[in-house]
Amino acid sequence: MSKKAESTTPIFLKPGHNAGDLVESPKWKILKEEAGLVEVDAHLPGHLLNPRNQMFGGFHGTYVDMISLYAVRTLFNEQNQFKWSSTVNMRIDYFAPVMGPRFLLRGEVINDGRTTCLVATTFSDFDGNKLVYAITTLKKSQ
């Protein structure tokens, strides 16, 4: 693994961004990063739990949005810089509860179009069980 893959630094949001701070993204571990694909070991903060000690359903979208953005950013480099993106559609399918303390996130760019990207995000446990699957359409702004 490269140094970047072993990093526990913020994925793409420095502390001080509301969404990143909410899900405590600076504590995530990047497991894999390549063009159009990211895999992350994330944790489940206590303040995101429902009364059954599962991730409250409304917070899944925050994780999906962040991983989708991160996956799209992997397609860009210093010469072809990523400027901004807007989420125009998100569909989330829930298969099983996301339980802590840690879980895996995988974001994969399915289609990189001229103005939009389609990204798949999967939440899994460490036994390989798929917990949540999401498809997101992002509008690219360069």
Image: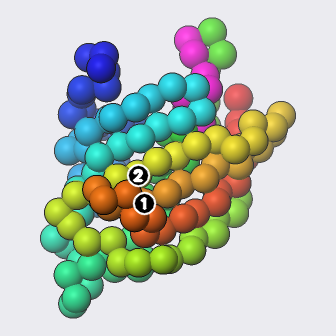
From this view, report whether residue 59 is shown above or below residue 1: below
Q: How is the image coloured?
A: rainbow
Q: Which residues are magenta?
A: 72-78
Total marks shown come to: 2
Q: Is-magenta flag for residue 76?
A: yes
Cα distance, mark 1 to mark 2?
5 Å
- Outermost front residue: 127
User: Three-letter amino acid code at disc 1?
Assistant: Phe
The answer to whether the residues at label 1 and label 2 have Cβ atoms under 8 Å apart is: yes
Q: Secondary structure at mark 1?
A: strand
- Residue 85 percent coordinates (x, y): 63, 43
In the picture, measured across the screen, residue 4 lies left or right of residue 77, that is left
Label 1: which residue? 123
Residue 131 x %, y %: 43, 69
Confirm whether residue 62 shows in the render: no
Residue at coordinates 53% horizontally, 54% vertically from top-left?
A: 121
Q: Residue at the spot x=17%, y=63% of the render?
A: 101
Q: Quadrant of residue 13?
A: top left
Mark 1 or mark 2: whose residue is earlier in sequence: 2
Q: Which residue is mark 2?
A: 105
Categorize mark 1 by other alpha carbons within 10 Å: few (<14), some (14-19), many (20+): many
